[in-house]
Image: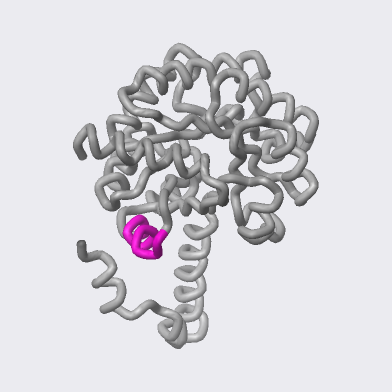
Amino acid sequence: MTGSDIADRARIFRRLHDGPRAFVMPNPWDAGTARLVERAGFAAIATTSAGHAFSQGMPDGHASLDALLLHVSDLAAATTLPLSVDLEDGFAATADTLCPVVEAVAGAGAVGASIEDRKRSGELYPIGEAVERVEAFVAAAHALPFPFTVTARCECFLAGQPDLDETIRRLRAYESAGADVVYAPGLPTRNEIRTVVDAVQSPVNVVAGLGGATPSIAELERLGVRRISLGSAIARVAFGAVQRALDEVQTHGTFGFEADATPYAELDAAMAR
């Protein structure tokens, strides 16, 4: 990929957040599923830490930075779509070690990334430290030769601290630190989504399929959401289909799962470029 290619993808991605309509950003877990996303007509993709880890035979949060960089490179080469990266906690113990990580994912072909305020051990960073990390992330992004979109995630609802006021306090602080997009995965109701959207100025991302029924695209758009990601949902659908097929063969000795299989020729054509 040339420098002009990634700059073009970066500008396209940034403009998607400025449009009047919400856009959906699916999360493929390998090059093949990335091709399917592009073929389906979506405008951008993002990695899924869980989907990638599962595809490597490990639990979420256990993939190394080197493995992630190879994954990013594979996805960026597989499609022409802008790619944002789920960077988890940034793969950096301190704020001052974030810069080379941002440079590395950008060098692998990403035009954006998200950073969480939850440690790999599960607890939240104190808000002051979390803000410092977002500031360092933003500074590294601004040093790149193209507009790299920074998403800051507040993990309160996933870390067992479902405090909406604290979530908003953190998101506002990350916004003030320079984040381009803010994100609080796990908001359980439409009212809480609307409250978050109204409390910040930045575009808000909502993840679909994370517990409970997700409102439709049209409903999320009416709530003011600008970006909708799918997280690990489609990966879990795919892995679930594999589990059910294997269970059928092992338990019943039948092959009825084949009725739901995508035709070979269709997939073969989808992988051709």
Magenta stretch containing residue 38, yes or no? yes
Q: Position of residue 219 (x, y in %)?
A: 68, 57
Of 159 and 172, nearer the camera is 172
Residue 111: say if magenta: no
Q: Is residue 62 visible?
A: no
Q: Where does the N terminus fall, quadrant-wise?
A: top left
Q: In percent of the image, x 76 and y 51: which residue is there?
A: 190
Residue 192 in the image: x percent, y percent? 77, 44
Q: Residue at x 68, y 36 (%)?
A: 159
Residue 148 seen anywhere in this rendered image of the structure: yes
On screen, residue 116 versus residue 219, left or right, reads left
Q: Position of residue 14 (x, y in %)?
A: 44, 37
Relative placement, left or right, of 186 versus 137 is right
Q: Main secondary structure of the magenta part?
A: helix
Q: Residue at x 72, y 45 (%)?
A: 193
Numbered range of the magenta stretch: 33-41
